[in-house]
Amino acid sequence: MRTLDTDAGTALVRFSDTLFGADEHYYYSSAGVFEYDRTTGELSRNPGENWNPERIASHEQLRRPLVYLEMNATKTVTVEETTAVRYTVTGFRDPDSIPFDTATGQITVAEEGFIAEYNITRASDGNSRQERYDLSEVGTATVSRPAWMPDE
């Protein structure tokens, strides 16, 4: 989950990894970057860490799992009132450079170029890893101060 409030200069990012049991939340503000691990309850603050909205809104982190995939455009769909193309994942472009044997799933890209969603499963030797992303809102967003943040 990633939410960016450009008016207030705050952001909230959540990474959840069910395979390894990680559930980390990051709150970005003018006071620094706060990291909260829901599995351990540990909160850390990095007051000097530089961050900017462009880094939070970047597609680079979203794009990384998609780089080596082989895919075919399968149909046109509508996402957030804009035309998008849905791709079906058929495997890997260079299978020898990937630690997985198979890849399946779908990727949806809006005609403006943004990734609207993906659901990809990579597997090998009985192990699999699923990655999902879903753009839930385009336009204005508000980031509220999380309940896990310490009192000011």
Image (tube, helix red, strand yellow):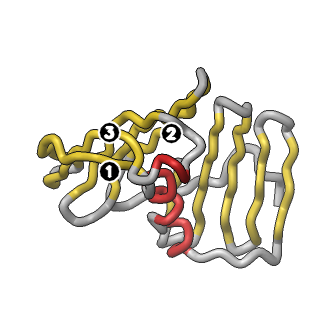
Which mark is in front, 1 or 3? 3
* Distance from the alpha carbon under mark 1 to that under mark 3: 19 Å
Q: Position of residue 47 (x, y in %)?
A: 82, 72
Camera-side residue of 19 and 55? 19
The residue that mark 2 highlights is 131
Give the residue number, with chain letter if any, for mark 3: 90
Residue at (85% x, 38% y) in the render:
41
Inspect the image, locate mark 1, and give the three-letter code of the amino acid beneath it: Ala
Crowding near the residue tagged with mark 1, few <14, some 14–19, many ≥20 C-alpha atoms within 10 Å:
many
Determine the CA span between mark 1 and mark 2: 14 Å
**Tag 2: residue type?**
Glu
For the point 62% across and 47% down, which residue is it?
14
Q: Amino acid at mark 3?
A: Thr
- Identify which residue, 72 or 112, lies in the foreground: 72
- In terms of sequence position, does the residue under pointer 2 or pointer 3 come before the other? 3
Q: Which mark is residue 6?
A: none
Place residue 28 in its image quadrant: bottom right
Q: Residue furthest top?
A: 126
Determine whether 47 is above or below 70 in the image. below
Q: Position of residue 67 (x, y in %)?
A: 44, 57
Front residue (pair 118, 73): 73
Label 2 vs label 3: CA separation?
Answer: 15 Å
